[in-house]
Image: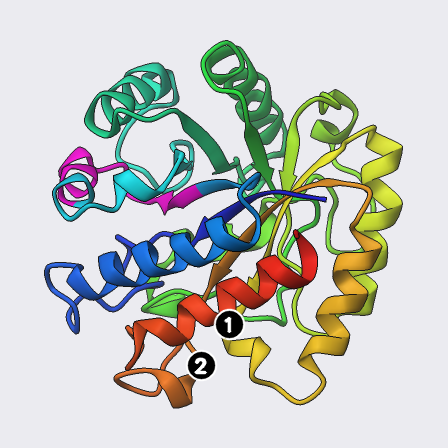
Amino acid sequence: MIEAIQFWNEPNNLSHWDYTLDPDWSIFSAMVKYASQEVQNEAPQITKLLGGLSPLDPDFVDLMRRQGVLDVVDVVAMHGFPLDWNLWQIDQWPAKVAEIEAAAGRPVWITEVGASSFGAEEIQLFGLQRTIELLGPLVPRIHWYSLIDLPTHKGAITRHKESEGSAYYRHFYFGLLRSDGTPKQAMKHFPPEMGICQWIEFEDDDMLELVRHWLPRLGVRVLRTGVSWADWHRPGAVQWFDKMMCALSDFNLTVTLCFTPPSRGLVPNHTSPPQDVGEFAYFCREVSRRYAS
């Protein structure tokens, strides 16, 4: 069942929200406030999350507070990868949590955290174990990214692709499973009370079955995935998402709603602010009505 809806994914990251088109995030703020009200009307039991922050910027949280966004959400979500991308060390996690909690005046969830096995599987195992030690006592929800490696033939969503050097190639090694489905060292140390973050692409039946197969084997009941607004505009979208949500109905789901249909953006890109914030709110209402009411 859906226990939480997360509005957008990393809104303060140019790879996911083009703030050059919305420099003060006023469009984003209006969009979330409108969408949150629609979700509240349809499914008041749902926990509403401000999309996972990356970077962990208290000034952005303060902006969201001043623009009224924090008044309409229950939780602020955080994303962090200190062993791979962030310019801070893993032992700073408690300080980062405290900083965002203080700025938000809201609880925080960690909806995306991970460590790649790019250099060695032992590093990923250390990252998993240290993350549990540091964050387990502090937050009620942790979603580990991810279940399976991104296949190398699929491009990662970044601004500069291969020119980013090793930072780009690390994208492909965050799974507990290798891309061929074989387990890594960290798999046998994964605690069942922890959540998984795994994106399931549109009409990817193989990934859907992989999630359904492996999460029960791990004893995991908590899953974060996404319902893409851009994909919602594809032919056959409702049939696919009906199938996906039915298949995942036994899990406690945090569903991230994000990505602008190119035809509905200020520019034709999934990172664009929409032409009409009401259209995103309508999408959120339909998802809530169909899968959470």
Residue 52: name its quadrant.
Answer: top left
Q: How is the image coloured?
A: rainbow
Please state which amino acid type lies under the numbered disc 2.
Pro
Q: Where is residue 284 in the image (x, y as percent from the top left)?
A: 50, 63
Q: Which of 73 and 194 is in front in this view?
A: 73
- The 10 Å Cα crowd at callout 1, few under 14, some 14 to 19, many 20 or more, is many
Q: Does the magenta stretch include residue 59?
A: yes
For residue 156, above or below residue 73 = below
Q: As rendered, which of 34 and 123 lies closer to the eye?
A: 34
What label sits on residue 261 in the rendered view? 2
* Total numbered circles: 2
Give the image quarter of residue 157: bottom left
* 171 horizontally vs 161: left or right: right
Mark 1 secondary-structure assignment: helix
Q: Position of residue 211 (x, y in %)?
A: 79, 49
- Region in magenta: 49-63
Q: In this view, does 117 lie to the left or right of 70?
A: right
Q: Can residue 8 be seen in this view?
A: no
Q: Position of residue 124 (x, y in %)?
A: 58, 31
Q: Mark 1 points at which residue?
A: 229
**Residue 23 picture location, percent across and down:** 11, 64
Q: Tell me which residue sits at (39%, 54%) in the image.
A: 37
**In the rendered structure, does residue 273 fall within the stretch colored magenta?**
no
Does residue 190 appear to the left or right of 30 in the view shown? right
Q: How far apart are marks 2 and 1 (CA)?
A: 6 Å
**Label 2 with label 1: CB-CB less than 8 Å:** yes
